[in-house]
Image: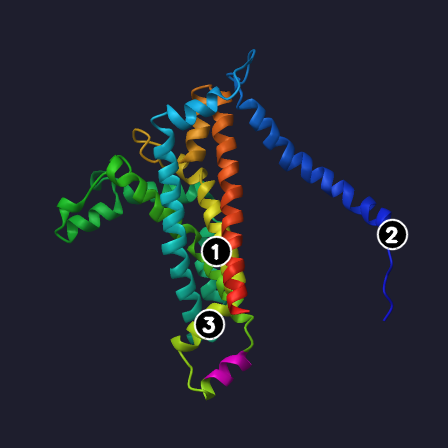
Amino acid sequence: MNVLKVSKWTITAFVLPCLLLYTCLVFVPILVSVYSGMLEWNGFGASTFIGLDNFTKMLTNDPEFWPSVGRTFMLSGFSMFVQLPVALFVAILISRYIKKPSFLVSSYFLPVILSVVIIGQLWKTIYNPASMGGMINQLLIKLGQGSWSHAWLSEPKYAMYAVILVSLWQYVGYHILIQFTGIQNIPADIYEAAKIDGASGFKADRYITLPMIVPIFKISVVLSFIGSLQSFDLIMVMTGGGPAHATDVISSYMYNMSFLSQKYGYGSAIATFLVVVCLLATVIINFIFNRIEKRYS
């Protein structure tokens, strides 16, 4: 077999432009954000260098920052521990019982390709009070449970859970598709051999399906967690972070501080915190799944 030998300089010539572009689009904005976080600046006029004051205030003297972090991790927790198991369970059922699953998988994926604005406005209508045509409240009243009806997006006690439900509904089809594809790539011969040995149904899923889709499941976990940390558009469409900051997450709080309150330096400090959390989360998730993969390899 002929092996194509290419000099290191040739490889460098082809890789360097893409590497420079990636650096300019990813690392340079991160460094600029870190520097901007050390400024007292409204984004337009003159700026004043204040060192780590924004970071100190953010971590120790901002009553809204840590609650927004808590809501962000709550959204991530629901996404990883509710959405992903449901997606995996549905993917297993489709693989096992549906002979031509393409249409069904595509149907589950449909909310992912819809505009977030459309989804947000649709669910705002669904959550409306009964007097404004809200479907959930009208249904509760017809079932004789009118005391359970609420202004779901206007009451701080329920608003965040209402947004989380919409987020889970929107992206569950995305993870069903990923995990269904991983299950389909498992050779059928393995299941047939296991069936001869008496392992079928959910027993086969436990000892064959789950261990063999660990790399695919890791992709879902990373995308789910990082996507939840960066959630912004749906919250801004549905609640704008309200009522009374009850649905503010890190990204929406950063936006409100940067552009509505005109505290661009402080918003950049929050953005830096978000980048650090995303990087740490990716490293931790990869470490955990590498340990799992070594266990089953």
Q: Is residue 172 visible in this depiction of the protein?
A: yes
- The dot on residue 128 is none
Q: Quadrant of the N terminus?
A: bottom right
Residue 233, horizontal then vertical, whole percent: 45, 38
Q: Under tag 2, what secondary structure? A: loop
Precedes in sequence: disc 1 or disc 3: 3
Placement of 18 over or under 34, stated as above or below: below
The Cα–Cα distance between marks 1 and 3, rounded to whole angstroms, is 16 Å
Q: Disc 3 designates what residue?
A: 95
Q: Disc 1 designates what residue?
A: 174
Precedes in sequence: disc 1 or disc 2: 2
- For the stretch drawn in magenta, the main secondary structure is helix
Identity of the residue drawn at 56% across and 23% down: 36
Q: Quadrant of residue 249?
A: top left
Along the line of sight, the residue nearer the viewer: 142 or 168: 168
Identity of the residue drawn at 49% across and 55% down: 288
Residue 238, horizontal then vertical, whole percent: 37, 37
The Cα–Cα distance between marks 1 and 2, rounded to whole angstroms, is 42 Å
**Figure colour scheme:** rainbow
Placement of 108 over or under 159, stated as above or below: below
Identity of the residue drawn at 45% across and 41% down: 229
Q: Amino acid at mark 2?
A: Ser
The Cα–Cα distance between marks 3 and 2, rounded to whole angstroms, is 47 Å
Q: Under tag 3, what secondary structure? A: helix
Residue 253, horizontal then vertical, whole percent: 41, 30
Apparent side of residue 204 relative to residue 124 in the rendered image (left or right):
right
Q: Which residues are magenta?
A: 188-194
Apparent side of residue 152 relative to residue 230 in the rendered image (left or right):
left
Q: Disc 2 designates what residue?
A: 7
Proximity of marks 1 and 2: CB atoms separated by less than 8 Å? no
Residue 153, horizontal then vertical, whole percent: 29, 38
Proximity of marks 3 and 2: CB atoms separated by less than 8 Å? no
